Amino acid sequence: MLKGKGLFALLTILFLAGCQGSVEDQLKGSKSILEEPSTIEVAAPNESTEGLSFHLPSNVKIIETSPSNIILEGNNQTYIVFFNPFEDEFSKSLYEEEKSRRENVTLSTVKETDEGYYYSFIDSIEDDRYRIIIGRGGVKVTTESSGDTILSSVKTMVTMLRSSDVSK
């Protein structure tokens, strides 16, 4: 009986360690992209709303728009795009605002390129749930993701951000 309990405990530990490694791999891959956003190809804008043009991946759909927000759904997730037409791609205002509100930060990056000021926060919000916020100047995209889809969420979000163009 003791052998069975010991084996069960060992298998449980190995399973949990495997799951943790998966999140670590997702975060490591995400960090690589977020530290060097140019690794994601710039796609031509294929969608325009009042105030913002951007590339909308084929598996993502617009659900609702307002003067400074766009709600999207795709990949079993909701994405919220916020844009401020008074802030350019090099603005640090949204970054500073987000930075002051962060708790439980799992990953944070900042990168200034010739395209703009990129920033990101990945926060742990509950067991295996993460809030991802990625921005470039006055445009930011937010979603919630499970640990095993962090990297694909980051790729989708960076694709939209790199192609974004705010109308002034």
Image (cartoon, helix red, strand yellow):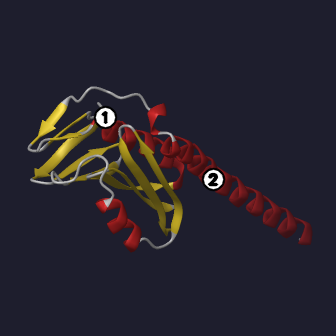
Q: Position of residue 106 (x, y in %)?
A: 54, 63
Closer to the observer: label 1 or label 2?
Answer: 2
Q: Badge 2: few (under 14), some or many (20 or more) residues near its Cα, within 10 Å?
A: some
The kind of residue on which mark 1 rests is Asn
Quarter of the figure that contains the C terminus: top left
Quarter of the figure that contains the N terminus: bottom right
The front one of 61 and 31 is 31
The front one of 141 and 99 is 99
Q: Badge 1: few (under 14), some or many (20 or more) residues near its Cα, within 10 Å?
A: few
Compared to 56, does 132 lie above or below? below
* Quarter assignment of residue 92: bottom left
Tag shown at residue 138: none
Asked if the residue at tag 2 contacts the one at tag 1, i.e. Cβ–Cβ closer than 8 Å, the answer is no
Residue sitting at 35 percent across and 43 percent down?
Answer: 116
The front one of 58 and 89 is 89
147 sits to left or right of 14: left
Q: Secondary structure at mark 2?
A: helix
Name the residue tied to disc 2: 24
Q: Secondary structure at mark 1?
A: loop
27 sits to left or right of 56: right
Q: Position of residue 27 (x, y in %)?
A: 57, 51
166 sits to left or right of 123: left
Residue sitting at 15 percent across and 51 percent down?
Answer: 85
Q: CA distance from mark 1 to mark 2?
A: 26 Å
Q: Position of residue 162 (x, y in %)?
A: 34, 37
Name the residue tied to disc 1: 59
The kind of residue on which mark 2 rests is Glu
Residue sitting at 24 percent across and 47 percent down?
Answer: 72
